[in-house]
Image (cartoon, rainbow, N blue to C red):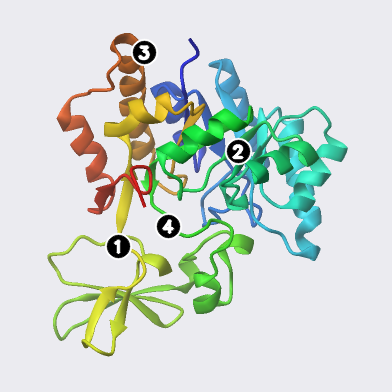
Amino acid sequence: MRKIEICAPAGNLPSLKAAVDSGADAVYMGFSGDTNLRNFPALNFTEDEVYKAIQYAHSKDKKVFITVNSYPQERELPLAYGVADKAYHFGADAVIASDIAVLSYIKKNHPGKRVHLSVQASASNVQAIEFYRRHFGIKRVVLPRVLTIDEIRALRKETDVEIEVFALGLLCINSEGQCFLSSYITRESINTYGACSHPKFIDFVQDDHDDSLKIFSNGVLLNKYSPAEEVAYPTPCKGKYYNRATGQLNNAIQDPESLNVLEILPEIIHAGVDSIKIEGRQRSRTYVEQVVRTFREAVDNYYKSGSCKIDRSKVQNIQSLFEGLAPSYGCYKGK
């Protein structure tokens, strides 16, 4: 029986090596610049680093997937095409793409090369998945984080396209690829420029009056924390907004929860999922190492004994890396 794949994040070369050495079957990463959706300063890979990363992973018999998953504007299409060219030239095992123009370019210029459909495409039903398979030859779909396990099981019965789902990390309740909250606040969309809270818009301000920490995005107050509260990196969907009726700040759109499926991993495996994806290219090498090692143990235990049970302290260690946010199953157990 082929084991479910563990697909790990890497925002730099040390993180990629940590993922590979800790038991990941595949690593996803991106070139520096606007072509992928973790476009942060000092994050992602130069061309030389991409080549070294692929060589290292392949020397350990692991796979590397390159993200080209933003939605480029007309003038940015040549950049996206060039990144896809370089990814395959350097030996990437697949390109993860979302934009139809990019997918079409790959099919025409790299026939036979493996392409995965990014979560940014929001393909959440069999008709959409089969459309992308039929027209662009996708081999895998990364499902948006809005489906239940029962819905995933039903999809599995209707398509032979590989299914990848998120297992750990930030929880996005919006239809990925269709969220414009960052555009409303900053005039720059995550779907185009690669970050729903780009650091250039974020300001951390200490309030001398009550010693609270205020976090602004382009002048809009997203969060206010007391000295005793854990501070998470701000995103518009998880911001606290002023309620004129109550005079209080509240999480109006989404509570700041993090996805963690360790305890329901057997159900996800039974649903016919081919790969579990760990979110966190923007996170540290330590995060990558610990979460990959924990999921590796859980998956191996399942195929040995039918149970993913691991030491409770390891689960708690994983949770401690979530910046104090509460764990959640997301939509997997119901909406």
Q: Kindly identify the amino acid type of the residue bearing the numbered disc 4.
A: Ile
The answer to whether the residues at label 3 and label 4 have Cβ atoms under 8 Å apart is no
Total label count? 4
Mark 2 — residue? 141
Residue 269 vertical position relative to residue 209 in the rendered view, above or below: above
Disc 2, SS: strand
The answer to whether the residues at label 3 and label 2 have Cβ atoms under 8 Å apart is no
Q: Earlier in the sequence, mark 4 or mark 1?
A: 4
Q: Kindly identify the amino acid type of the residue bearing the numbered disc 3.
A: Tyr
Q: Residue at x 29, y 62 (%)?
A: 255
Residue 173 — which label? 4
Mark 3 — residue? 303
Determine whether, in the image, residue 238 is placed left or right of residue 153: left
Q: Earlier in the sequence, mark 3 or mark 2?
A: 2
Q: Residue at x 62, y 24 (%)?
A: 55
Q: Residue at x 41, y 21 (%)?
A: 23
